[in-house]
Amino acid sequence: MFKTAVRAARPGALAVRASAKPSSSSVRAFSSSVRVLSGGPPPPSLVGPGAKPGTVPTDLEQATGLERLQLLGELEGVNVFDDSGLDASRLGTKANPVLVPSFDVERIVGCSGVPADSHDVLWFTLKKDKQARCTECGSVYALDYQGEEHHAEHHH
């Protein structure tokens, strides 16, 4: 169910992101539903069904969007958002930086030093095709971009 929801939501999200161009002169309706081209049952919705009249909804019944995606993932044992720490066992260098996985062209990174927790967390923005260095410990980080290449230029 979770994988079907992700598969169904991704093309719609990428299409909206790719075609998003601000225009003050035109107004159009926005639909977040995905067209089903092959017949068969529709994909699971990222909008919960809500509660039956007179009852209190559960988290899964009232959740929508990314929250519902996360709950569906937890039901199937999938960690939707990678919240694991980065490699803090070594100091990143220009020749061998610490790689930060990302599906976006930039990501905010927090460095706590090498070895881990040797200084306060310093936050900085890491961008695709440009390394960044922690000003406290000197560790170098690089973005390991895992998104689709032709969508990178549409970042806002």
Image (tube, helix red, strand yellow):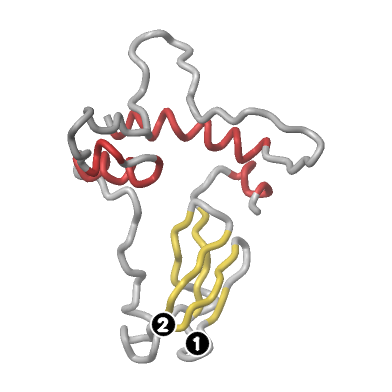
**Of 72 and 29, the residue lying toward us:** 29
Q: Label 1: which residue?
A: 138
Q: Secondary structure at mark 2?
A: loop
- Residue at the (34%, 28%) spot, across then down: 4
Q: Amino acid at mark 2?
A: Leu
Q: Amino acid at mark 1?
A: Gly
Where residue 154 appears, as percent x and y from the top left, is 67, 47
Q: Label 2: which residue?
A: 91
Where residue 149 appears, as percent x and y from the top left, is 60, 45
- Residue at the (19%, 44%) spot, across then down: 77
**Up/down of 63 relative to 106, above or below:** above
Give the side of residue 156 with respect to residue 133, left or right.
right
**Of 120 and 137, the residue lying toward us:** 120
Where residue 78 appears, as percent x and y from the top left, is 25, 45
Instruction: For the C terminus, give its image quadrant.
Output: bottom right
Residue situated furthest top in the rendering: 39
Give the side of residue 132 with respect to residue 46, left or right.
right
Q: Report which quarter residue 51 is drawn in.
A: top left
**Up/down of 31 relative to 61, above or below:** above
Q: Report which quarter residue 2 is drawn in.
A: top left
- Residue at the (45%, 15%) spot, across then down: 36
Asked if the residues shown at circle 1 and circle 2 are in contact, with their CB atoms under 8 angstroms apart, the answer is yes
Q: Secondary structure at mark 1?
A: loop
Q: Earlier in the sequence, mark 1 or mark 2?
A: 2
